[in-house]
Image (cartoon, rainbow, N blue to C red):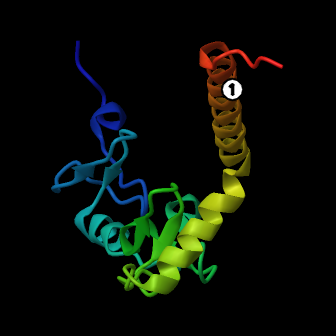
Amino acid sequence: MAMNHLESARFCASCGIDLSQRDCFLNSRGEHHCLPCYEAAKNCSADTAVPEALKTCVLCGGRVERKDCHKNRHGRYVCEKCHRPRKRRTWQHAVKKSLRWLVTSYERILLWVMYACFITFCLWLLYTLMARIAAPPVVD
């Protein structure tokens, strides 16, 4: 079965030129692109990038491409300008971290304090009862 000329013709999805006699690139959506359009799409800047590809920095609020930012351990993006290694081993950092832990886990601390008080009370009661049992009787 012979194909007609229109079925075998390939056109650039960006500029529309005929690619049947030229080298072309096929993208993941099945669209053909000529070499100049392919290079232009590959070298596009952040201004012409797709808005979904731009990420917002949580520290400065800037919009940057994904390749120019870092995803931190909380799943948020930080641009390279804001992502600087900091001194983390200072006493101020240790104090802030312990205070933050104390505030966020006060229920856990309260539970442990109650547990320690209960154990102390049980031991006091045990020793008091043992002292009464083991003590010689008092004769009047």
Front residue of 29/66: it is 66
Where in the figure is residue 95, as x and y percent of width and height?
55, 77
Secondary element type, mark 1: helix
Judge left or right: residue 18 versus residue 78.
left
Relative to 37, residue 93 above or below: below
Where in the figure is residue 92, as x and y percent of width and height?
51, 85
Residue at 42%, 72% (x, y): give it: 69
Front residue of 124/72: it is 124
Residue at 67%, 50% (x, y): give it: 105
Where in the figure is residue 28, as x and y percent of width and height?
34, 41
Relative to 57, residue 73 above or below: above
Q: Quadrant of the C terminus?
A: top right
Res. 48 visible in picture: no
Judge left or right: residue 138 versus residue 97.
right
Front residue of 1/97: it is 97
Residue at 34%, 31% (x, y): give it: 7
**What residue sits right under mark 1 in the picture?**
128
User: Hey, which residue is sitting farthest right in the picture?
Assistant: 140
Alpha-carbon neighbours of circle 1 within 10 Å: few (<14), some, or many (≥20)?
A: few
Q: Amino acid at mark 1?
A: Thr
Where in the figure is residue 75, as x and y percent of width and height?
51, 55
Front residue of 72/37: it is 72
Residue at 65%, 36% (x, y): give it: 120
Judge left or right: residue 25 versus residue 29.
left
Res. 113 visible in picture: yes
Judge left or right: residue 62 versus residue 41.
right
Q: Quadrant of residue 83?
A: bottom left
Q: Quadrant of the N terminus?
A: top left
